[in-house]
Each structure stands twice: as structure tokens, then as C-alpha cells.
Amino acid sequence: MAGGGEESSPGAAAPGVKRKTTEPTSDGSAVEGAAAAVPAPPPAEEPAAKQQRRGSSRTCVHEVAVPKGYASTKVESVHGTMADPFYNGPMAKTYPFELDPFQSISVACLERNESVLVSAHTSAGKTAVAEYAIALSFREKQRVIYTSPLKALSNQKYRELSQEFSDVGLMTGDVTLSPNASCLVMTTEILRGMLYRGSEVLKEVAWVIFDEIHYMKDRERGVVWEESIIFLPPAIKMVFLSATMSNATEFAEWICNLHKQPCHVVYTDYRPTPLQHYVFPIGGAGLYLVVDENEQFKEDNYMKLQETFSKQKGQSSGGRSGGKASGRIAKGGTPQAGSDIYKIVKMIMERKFQPVIIFSFSRRECEQHAMSMSKLDFNTQDEKDAVEQVFRNAILVLNEEDRSLPAIEYMLPLLQRGIAVHHSGLLPIIKEVVELLFQEGLVKALFATETFAMGLNMPAKTVVFTSVKKWDGDSHRYIGSGEYIQMSGRAGRRGKDERGICIIMIDEKMEMNVLKDMVLGRPSPLVSTFRLSYYTILNLMSRAEGQFTAEHVIKNSFHQFQYEKALPSMGQKISNLEKEASLLESSGEAELAEYHKLELDIAELEKRIMSEIARPERALLFLCTGRLVKVRDGSINWGWGVVINIVKKPPPSLGSLPAALAASRSNAYIVDTLLHCSPVLSENGSPPKPSPPRPGEKGEMHVVPVPLGLISAVSSLRIAVPADLRPPEARQSILLAVKELEKHYSRGLPRVNPVTEMGIESPEIIESVKKIEELEKKLFSHPLRKMGQNEQQFKWYQRKADVNHEIQQLKSKMRESQLQKFRDELRNRSRVLKKLGHIDSDGVVQLKGRAACLIDTADELLVTELMFNGTFNDLDPHQVAALASCFIPGDKSNEQIHLRGELSRPLSQLQESARRIAEIQRECKLEVNVEEYVEATVRPYLMDVIYCWSKGANFAEVIEMTDIFEGSIIRLARRLDEFLNQLRAAAHAVGEVDLEKKFEAASDSLRRGIMFANSLYL
């Protein structure tokens, strides 16, 4: 099919391109403009989401967001129109292949000098668009910046672009090469730093390419992308490259609204190589095709698959329903799991389905699986020789002593047999050798973690998932459709394979809708994870020109844009609830209002008591398996449920839900609770958001993750919970037990007494307990309560009261500005900065603040505190390096930490300072848990290792000191070097010459050997 790059007649749409124009209004909402004339167009109002599942044909969706009143100056015969761009002029770059429609449209947008978001599957060919933007900049004698989320990806991209273009530089914090080049490859953090400092380079830049823009939803680092986009000068145009996402148009509207320039979306679901998805039941035999290359779900095969588990019942060990461990991680590397992987890999090789990538969610599991392949050999003698030559040449960059490290010696025999491992804990040089050998076809079976699915295009014929559940820091959960799309996208090599093959290994029955949603579900939306950091606030305060303020950043964030966009849907929900309220019975209004007020008063008192009970140090003693708890989420009263498990979690990012509905950040614990849920499925067949059954509806018991803050009461009762909660009958038996208890205790289940059983002696709590007893007496003697003979009518009354309450809550959320929440937070953070002496009472940045402005690798408040309270002054450079390592996030050690005397005192001072800063933040009304803050900011796991390395120990010696992966140690050491350089710059900025020299000496003591060996890509 012809591409859309060089149409002969102006205004003709590229074949297979669906188009739509949107025009953001001043309030950020979007108004549809005229759609371009297209052959057989869909209805104008059909959103991109509904056009998504069209992967079988070579189509794309083109949309454009245009600022109000914007007029294009382009010549239509050359550039087409805004809604229908094409390009008839001389190309800045030609390709040895015919461009796909999405590539042609993207090129036309670039030639119009307008920003574009390209959202497409892995291996669809997004790189061709980025290369065109670079070629275009070179043609126009302009500079271009290419940003990527990771240093390793930046190195790879630098190598790839250097082969295509001559004038390319690299800036990653670790390495700077040709900083005056026309095309600069860098990490997004480096770009943000340049924007804060007002770098002169940016005056010459015409385009910025953001690769992997979906990284913006990363909880820790997503804000870096958001700030970089906000700060970019409006004259600079942007190219965003993304995996498929379901709200690409919303993102483009934000860009249009923010920079007052058009932003095109070119979205394609087209896979150059279609995929077939098979399931392999662990312990069973054979593969079951569940989704064919036309994306048709095979229900008959799914039923056969389920039968295999019925036959195996009782043999496999599984987790509970609702997100507990599936047993895969624990089983990793055992003979049973190993033999299944072995069988699959052997079968893949016999059927000539290699190369294969086997994805595991555990680094140790990757290695165990690879080692279990000892009897398999996939390479010829010639290939073995080629592998050895590449390997020997690669390790020449290392010192003699490092070439004989066990981690290096063990790898060659494996690689020679065409088997390799790839994960973040490997030595960087080994990881790069594996990548290069895989690209050359010398690795046939690669055992990798999901990080391999990011970045450079390294496809295989087959992809295997050893598990469908992963630990995400909170719990074991099924992987989402977005994650599955990203990893499965590695299957199928364009031009080589007719189809790609995905094999999913599962070890327990899987609900059909869960499997269907994972394989065929919509890609996940891009949600903002915007937050205010002290680094951002101080940098904005210290900018001389005052062009940007923290308020400006908040107002223009994607987070605020998404919140404002959600308001109309909240209005619609209110309208729907009001209709439902009018349909419900209206008699007995006064009694209903009185009864409902009693309920709300009790709920308010329960909330007050629960704020004391729910303190983790108290609650965790009581919230054990089988404990009955009452759950209330705003107006939604779940009633009593049963605790199954409790997990600690980091506070959710503000952007993880539409802002108005985001949960409180204070909920640091999640209680997996068995609750009575409505059995209704959502329209698209995916599991719905759980909700209690409606009046008269027969519900089902499911495990629901409940934030600790939503538990409104804790009962003194516990019940026995079956070991396996997967069978519905097991869960239903618990529902019957709870119902029996509620019948037995007609006045309500007995609650844990906070005074007598938990020892809380607060007069306020004692008074609240008494008041609840009085109100409950009134509630149980109320006329409505006596309507037991007409339970259905009573439930209607209750539903009406709940609906009215929900309407009031939604209305107040619509009135409450999300902006105000951020303003309050900004005010509180400014108080902290004043108390710590970073700014004065007029908001002018002081000496301490000037130092903090230069530190974005670690906790800027804590590190400047150590600089100014003299902690570093008493240490030698080796101790400085060891203490600074505590600031760098990395892997936790499972071993007990025993520190030598010269490190334990500085560590105590660091922990003491962290505790003080946490307490000051709490005093200034920020939600900070002191102990959690200390634990999160002080990580002493590699202090000894860094100390010994700094003093001259060799790598073989230091890796024996810890159970942390070698690659993780090296990654931390390199980030530590970057951090020490920031500390040096901070000391220089405030005139601390001795400290500056000490930080420099600490950095110099690290920079040697394998820790800082050059990348093979450079």
C-alpha cells in the first residue's frame, strides 16, 4: 500500500489514515474541528480508543490539536492542510524502504515544522521518524536534542545515530562526548538541568525528541519529563515517541494548550508482524492457542486449558485470589519450573522458532533458568568462534585482574552455546556484549527481565513469559495490558518472520476476562505523576528573570490539565446519580434523613477513633488474617469484610488517578480484604472496579486491596480463613459465616475497644466511644430499623441516602480546586525551606538554598544539612564517599549490616539529621512518616563496599562483601560519582574550598577499573 509521504494531489488523505482535528479552548477542554475528507471515514466523533483494535491492516489514526485562532502559513500544494498534512518537496532524508502511512504522515508534520506525538508498537518503526527530525535539523543548519530515560539507552542511541549521522554528541552525567555537536543525545535529567540553568545551547535548538515519553508516568522520575516540557521555549518543536497509549489525544491537547502550537498525534496499532498468543500450563503438556494472528480469542482452546488445571488440582501450589503471591517466585529454579522452561525452549529450537526471549520478573530466576539449560547447545562451531572473538575483544577494555572475575568467566561457555542472560544486575560490559551478540544472531535463547523490552529494537521470533504475575513493590499482581504489549512486542522480526509467537506460562487457573484483558486489552493511559520537589521550588525561586514560578509550573502541569478535563465527566456522573435518586422511593423523607444523620454521626466518630487505631504501630498488631473489619469509601458503605493480608506500600503518586479521585497519600498500607462485591462486569469485559452489591443483587466474595485509611471499624472477632481462596465456594463459605455473625449480633458486631483492648487513654477517644454507644442505641430503636419485615424497602431507603451523599461529595470535589491543594503544599514546603534556612522570610534564596539548587541526584534538604552542620568536615574522602553512597537509591541487601567504627558514627549523624528534617516537615503540615522517611532516604547497604573500593580494594574483593548484584554495585558507584560532582559544584557555589577538594578527592578515589570501564557503544 502506498505511503502518505508524496501525494500527487493536495488534500488527498494517505491510504488507511483516519483523521480528526481538535481545538483546545481556553479552559483546556477540546472542541472538535472539521475532520479532513478521507475515504470511507469513521463517524467524526469516533475517538481514537475505538479505532485502536485494527492491527491487522496497515492503518493509522491522525489527529491534531490546534490552538484557538491559529492560522497556518504553509503552502497547501507542498504541505497539505493542518488536518491533512502531506509533503511534496525534496526530502531531508530518504529511506531504502517504502514508508508506512504513519511514518509518511509524521514526516509531513515535521516538514510543516509542527510538533508530533508518534504512538506505535515496539518494532513498528518510530526510529525512522526521529531520524527524519534529525536530518531536517541538519538541513536547516539547526541543532537537535534526543533525550532518553536511561543512560544505557542514551549510549546505545548515540552509537546508532553516529552510524547514520556524523555530527552527534553525548551527555549523560557519566560521559560527555562532543558537547558542541549539532545532534546531542542526553538523558532527560540533563535536559532539565540545562533548562534550569538557561543553557546557551538551547538558543540554537529547533527540535527536541523525547524517546519513550510514556516514562512520564514513572512514579519517581516522571516529573522530570513534565518539567522539561513545561520549561522548553515555545519556539522549540517536539517529537514524542511512545508505546501505544489510550489517551494520546489528551497529551497532544496539553502540549497545544501549554505551548500554543499545534500538536499532531499519529497513532497506529499496526504490527508489521502479527502475533499468535499461546498458553502453556505449568506441569501440563502442550500449547494452547488462545489468540490468533487476527486477534480472535479462542474460547474453545481456553476451556481445554482450564480442564488441564482441573486434572492437576491439588498438585500446584498457588496464591490466594486478589493479588497475593502466585508461588512462581518461590518456585523459580526448582526442578519442576526448570523442566517446564527446558521443555519449552527445546521445543522452540526443534520447531525453528528461535531466537527466543524468555521474560522473568526476577533477576535470580533469569540466571537459574539459563543455568538449567546446561544440556542444550544452539550454536555451530563457527558461531562459537565468532562469539569468543567478540567476547575476547570486548573484555580488552578491562584491567587484567578484572577479566578473570567469576561473573565474566562463567558467561563465555553459556554465550558460546547461544544462551544468554540480560538484567540490570549484570556487569554493564556483559550486558552490552549480550546485546551485540543478540543483534548479530549469535544468541538464540535470551533470559531477560522486562527492562530488555525498552529502548533499542531487538526483536526475536518468539517471546516466552515464565509468569503472568509480578511483584510491583506492593503485591504480586497480574501484569497489565500495557506491560504485556511492551514485552510481547519483541516477538516477530519485520521482513523475517510471517508471525511472532508469544507463549504465556501459567501455574493456576486464570479467569478468561483477566487473560483476555491482558492479551487484547487497551494500552494503558499516560497519567501525570507530577509532584513538587524542593529542588524545583528552589531552582524556580533562584531564577533571576522570574519567568517561571512554582505556581506557573503547577498551573501548566499535565496533572492539572487532566484534573480540569475530568470535571465534565464528574458533572455527568452527578447528573446520572440525580436521575437515580429521583427514581428511588420518595416517601418517609424525614425519617430517612434522621436515620441517615445518625449513620453519618456514627461514621464521623468511628473515623475519629480509627485515626488513632489505624496508626501502623497499633493497627498491624490487630489486622491479622481472619480479623473482621468494616470498610467505608466516602459514601460507599461496604459493610464487614475479612482481612487476608496487609502490605506496606510507598505513598501513591498524585497522578495515579484523576486528581479529584486520588486517594490520600497517607495510606502507606494496603489491607487485602475479602468483601461482598457486585458480580457485574464492565462493558468491555475487563474486570470492573469492585463495588458492593445493589439491593436485591446476589453478590460474590472477592479480595479487594483496601487502603488502611478506608477501614472505618475493627471488630474484636476473627474467623478461620481457608488456605486456598481461589475456589468461589471457599470464598462464599466466608460470606455465610459473616452473615451468621451479623444475625447473631443483631446490634452490630463487637468492635475492638480502643481504650480497654488497645490501651489508648486519650480523653477525646474515651468520649467518642461513649457517644457511639449512645447513638447506636438510637439507631437500633429507630422506626426504619423496625422495618425488618420489609428489608427490600429499607435497602431502597439506604440506597437513596447513599446516592444523595455521593452527589454532595462529587459537587464539593468539583468546587474544590486541585490547584489549591498544590498551593497549600507549596506554602508548607516553603515554610520548611524557611525553617531550615534555605530562603529568608521574603522568599529570597540564601547560601544553603543555592547549594541545594545544584543537587537533583539525592535528597537535597538532607545533604545540604550535612554540608552546613559540619558532618562532612570531620571525614576523610573515603568516609565521604561511603556516607554519600547512602543517598543513592539501589538494591536492598538481605544481609545484616555490620559497619566498621569509622562509618557507624557518620551514619548515626546522617540518620539523626534525616529524623530532624522529617519532623520539621511534619511540623509544617506535610504528610511525612518520620521512620519511613529515614528508611527511604538513608540506604547504608553498600557503605562498606564503597569505603573499601575507595581505599583501593579490587572488585573481586568488594563483591564478596555483599549479596547485591555486581551490576547494581557498579550502577550505584557511577551515580555516586555524579552525586559527588554535584556536591563539589554546590561547595564551590557557596565558597567552601576545603569541602570542594574533599568531594573531588572522593570522586577521584572511585574512578578506576571495571566500575568505570568505557561502554562498548562509545
Image (cartoon, grey):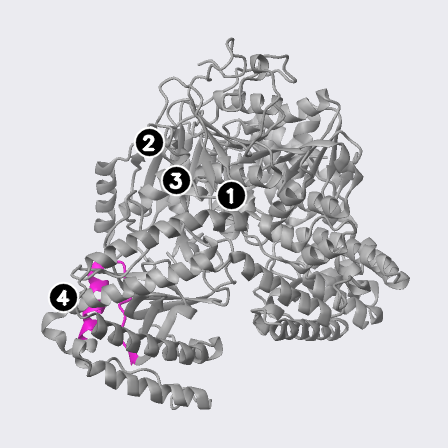
Do we see residue 496 in this rendering? yes
Q: Are marks 2 and 4 in contact (CB under 8 Å)?
A: no
Kindly report which numbered mark, 4 or 1, lies closer to the viewer in this rendering: 1
Query: Of the residues under marks 2 and 4, which one precedes in the sequence?
Result: 2
Kindly report which numbered mark, 3 or 2, lies closer to the viewer in this rendering: 3
Kindly report which numbered mark, 1 or 2, lies closer to the viewer in this rendering: 1
Residue 792 tag number: 4
Task: Tell me what residue is drawn at x 62 percent, y 43 percent.
Answer: 149
Between 906 and 763, which is closer to the camera in this rendering? 763
Q: Mark 3 = which residue?
A: 522
Kindly report which numbered mark, 3 or 1, lies closer to the viewer in this rendering: 1
Residue 180 tag number: none
Is residue 738 covered in magenta?
Answer: yes
Q: Mark 2 = which residue?
A: 295
The amino acid marked with disc number 1 is Gly
Residue 154 percent coordinates (x, y): 66, 38
Task: Tell me what residue is drawn at x 71 percent, y 43 percent.
Answer: 172
**What element does badge 1 sit on?**
loop
Q: Mark 1 = which residue?
A: 28
| 10 Å crowding of disc 1: few (<14), some (14-19), many (20+) | some
Query: Of the residues under marks 1 and 2, which one precedes in the sequence?
Result: 1
- C-alpha distance separating marks 3 and 1: 25 Å
